[in-house]
Image: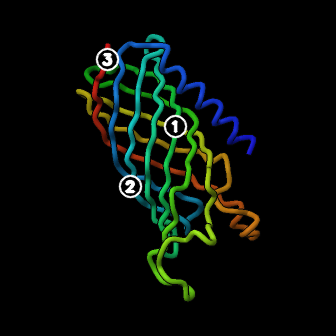
Amino acid sequence: MKTIKLLVFCMTLLYSSLALSARDYSLILSGGYTGSHHNSDDKTNGAIAELAFQMPVYNRIYFSPATAFDMRYMQMGQWLGEFSLRAIGGYTLPVSKVALNIFTGPRMDVKAFEYTSEVWYGDLPGYDSSDPHYNRVNAYWLFGIGFEFRDIVLKGSYSLPLTRYVKPFKYPSEECHKRLHIFEVTLGYRFRIGK
């Protein structure tokens, strides 16, 4: 809980920094693949859509607060939808006609829903609200690299888990130590909205 409170505080500070600059604002709308992995038998696949606001801070350093929604197939017919808040700092390195972006920062995922699409052990398909398996909020630290050419942006990232992914008091087995490592690859377009 302390980790989550610290991340919320840091992200609030970064979002408030938007009022400090009016130079070269841009919005980046992107979508693509997201997957996660805990071990060789526990992998997920899904899709993600992201909207990022990017602003310069100093020289080639920038802040890029972002929000995203992803939906992943977990296991045993379970689908998980999550909203994600990211407070990203990065550095842009021009390479010929291509810009190379290196970025990192905290992200907080908030569960939107769990959905069971198949019948398991007599349970009927539908929304699982009575006995949720996954945590409501999870925290990560994100690392990524991106390439930009004529406002087309290709990004890849890895999110290091800072919290457990399942509820340990409901699932006291070794599964309570599960931490999902998340990978994303997205393609998007930059809309320039200010100078």
Residue occupying image coordinates x 60% and y 44%:
140
User: Which three-letter amino acid code belongs to the residue tagged 2?
Assistant: Ala
Residue occupying image coordinates x 62% and y 51%:
137
148 over 185 or under it: above or below: above
Residue occupying image coordinates x 41% and y 25%:
54
Q: How is the image coloured?
A: rainbow
Query: Crowdedness of circle 2 by 10 Å Cα count: few (<14), some, many (20+)?
Result: some
Task: Report which residue position mark 1 lands on.
Answer: 86
Say which element carries label 2: strand
Answer with left or right where residue 185 lies relative to residue 133. Answer: left
Answer with left or right where residue 49 lies relative to residue 13. Answer: left
97 over 112 or under it: above or below: above
Q: Position of residue 178 (x, y in %)?
A: 66, 60
2 or 3: mark nearer the eye: 3
Which of the marked residues, 1 or 2, is nearer the chain's N terminus?
2
Which of the marked residues, 2 or 3, is nearer the chain's N terminus?
2
Task: Report which residue position mark 3 lands on.
Answer: 194
User: Which three-letter amino acid code belongs to the residue tagged 1?
Assistant: Arg
Badge number at residue 47: 2
User: Which three-letter amino acid code belongs to the residue tagged 3?
Assistant: Gly
Please identify the quarter of the rendering in which residue 8 is found: top right
